Each structure stands twice: as structure tokens, then as C-alpha cells.
Amino acid sequence: HLKLDNYKRKFIILFFVVTIAPFVEFSASDTIATVLCLWGFYFNLKYQKNEKYKNVLFSLISLGIAYFVKYSFLPFLLYPILSFILKEKANTFKRLKEFLIIFSTTIAAVLFFYILNYLIVGKMQIASSFDVFKGNIHWNQLSHFNGFLFVFGSVYQWVFENLIKNHLGISFHFNWLSILITIYFYYLFIKEFFSKKNLVQNSAIQNSINISLSAGALIIGFLTFLTLNDPGQTWTKPYWTFVQETRYYGPVIIIGLINILILFFAKKKGTLLHIIVPLMIVLNLYGYRTAIQSGFWGKNYNSYLSIKNDMNKELPQKNKLQVPVVFFNKDTKNSDPYYYLQSQGIILLEENKSYLGKNRDNKFIYYSLNQDSANKINITLIN
């Protein structure tokens, strides 16, 4: 549809091959819902090309089924309206008839799928509690915002943060960098879409950037609204909330990355974009290594977060100058906690009586991995 040169198309495909994020965090339902959303976007692109209303209908059906699979995708049903406004800009009211047809059809589809979902599921899902209307706005929860377009896998943020802390002695939060770069990407999209001097003279690509802007605005606005209503889920610490969940941005991430790579080819060399894109590739390649080394590959994401939280809680360094050393035995070797500690850069040693004796080096702080009667592996400080 975008009519890209052959080498650009191959580069984009190769980029997605090495991009472990966000797909490593997708469940089966996330993947299905994301594919359905992409089909919905595609049919709307076809409407923008040939203006046949059947494509709007196909788009709404795909987006509606995606909402059935993933309730957080509800706002994408409004995408045909917003994309039409963005595409036509000042001409929207000159094409009032077409706009009203799309508007009425879209609103009817939203109501139909929302009510049908209620009849099937038996609850409204979204409208469980609107604290915002009661004056209870949880602004603090927005600090968990996800820089979703700078993708190298939020699963591995702690790996990179730990490496920087260990080697440079600097406490650095990658999420803030991700947010800043995502804002920069959206600045490029807005500049390209509204500028009279486009870098890419291709209406299909302008329509693709339209998806990043309209669908991005819908999902960011929706998740922000849910987050402001949310005091924080207590089943995990730090408290989980909507805006931090990479999976919810899935369709916008994929379209956004394609648009970023198109602008990467269009921009002159030496710009910030020519630094960020190679960095993303390198970090994602490192992500593959971490996934295999840490044993995360194919494992449940939430269970791995639990391991991470447990291990961090049990590794309180008494002195910042002390380096943690963890002993393992044949029962605890190759366990999930073992692989997690290995990916953290923690020194792991097989149990040795000479190390466990009185002549210990004060530069280190010693722990032991033990398996209890319930076969759970715990980490304990060696006195």
C-alpha cells in the first residue's frame, strides 16, 4: 500500500525480525487483537484511497472484533472519525455529507459492539468506577507512563539500568529516556503531517502517519483517563496501572515504527533519528541475548516480574561498596531465580566451604539460594 522501494521494505521487515519488543510481552489475545486492529487500519487506508464506504464498514468490523478480544482497544473504534478529520483538516465541513456518514456509522458501531459485549460478558468492563467525576483524580499514577515507541523491551529495562549502575555508578531510569524519545517521534510525525514541505511526497505515507497521530491520540487519551481513575492495583508492586502496559499500545507501536523507519530513510544523515534507530536495533539484539540467558523466553511475564521483585527485596546491600555474591547448589542451579540473578550481573558461585568459612572478603556481601520443603527457591543472607 505504501509503495516503498524494495530495499526499504526489506529493511523494515528485517527491523521487525530483530525487534523483540513489544512482542515478547504479548499474550495470544494481545497478538490477535493487534492483528485485527491493523486490518481495521488497513481498510480505512483503502477508504482514503478509493472512498468506498464498504471499506469503512470492514474497518469497523475488524476494530469491533479487536475490542471483543481486548477491551482496552475500545477507543480504536473511533479511529475512522478522527482520521477523516485529520486528513481533510479545514475541508472537513466542505465534505460534510461524507463526514456525517462516517460519523454516524462509527458511533452506531461503537454502541453496537459495546452493548453486544455487555450482553455476552455480563459487565460493562470500562465503566466500573469513574473516580474522576467524584473529584478523586490519581495524578501520581501518570508517573508510570510508558515511552512505548522507543522499544527495546520494558522487560529488560532493569537489565540496562543495572549495567549502568554497576559500571558507571549512575542511577538511571530508562523509562524517562523512552518517554522523551517517544515525544520526539511524535514531534516528527506532527511536523511531517502538518508541514507544507513534506519530507515524503507520498499521500499513502501521509495517511500512515495519520494512523500514528489519530490512533495514538485515542489510546493515550483512553489509558490516561483510566489511569486517573485508578488508585493502583495492589496485586503487584510497584503498583500497576494502565498507561504503563506496553501491550495496550501494540497496533500504534507497529505502525509508529514503520513511520519512524520511513522518516529515517527520508531525513538527511547526521540527525538525531540516525542515532536513535541504530540504538534501538542494538538494544533489541541485546534483548534477545538477555531473553535466552535469563530464561525469560516463553515464560509468563507476570511470574517473572514476581521473581524480579522477590530477588530485589531480598538483596539489600548493607554498603553500596559491597558487591553481592550468591551461592547456588545442584538444586537451585538453572532455576528461574538463578537465571534472573545471572541477567542482573550478580556473581553466582557454586557452594564452596572455603568461601563459607570465616575468612570472607569485606568487599562482598554473601547470599545463598535455597530450596525449601515446598520446592520454592528463596534467597537468604549468610550471617
Image (cartoon, rainbow, N blue to C red):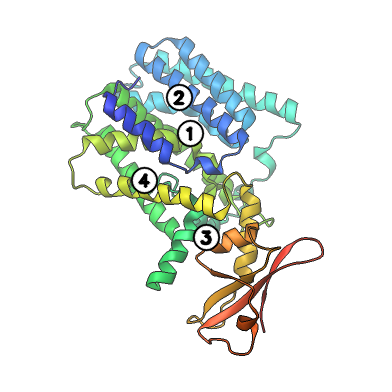
* Residue shown at 67% from the left, 45% from the top: 129
Residue indicated by mark 3: 343
Tell me the quarter of the picture where residue 119 sits: top right
Nearest the viewer among 23 and 376 is: 376
Counting residues from the start of the chain, the first of labels 4 and 2 encountered is 2
Foreground mark, 4 or 1? 4
Q: CA distance from mark 4 to mark 3?
A: 20 Å
Q: Earlier in the sequence, mark 4 or mark 3?
A: 4
Asked if the residues shown at circle 1 and circle 3 are in contact, with their CB atoms under 8 angstroms apart, the answer is: no
Q: Mark 4 or 1 closer to N-term?
A: 1
**On the image, which quarter does residue 149 sit in?**
top left
Residue type at mark 2: give it. Answer: Phe
- Residue wearing tag 2: 41
Q: Which residue is mark 1?
A: 251
- Answer whether residue 102 is visible to the viewer in this image: yes
Image quadrant holding the C terminus, namely bottom right
Amino acid bearing label 3? Ser
Above or below residue 9? Residue 147 is: below
Which residue occupies the extreme bottom position in the image?
358
Q: Nearer the viewer, mark 1 or mark 3?
A: 3
Pick whichever, 103 or 289, lies toward us.
289
Label of residue 319 in the image: none
Nearer to us of marks 4 and 3 is 3
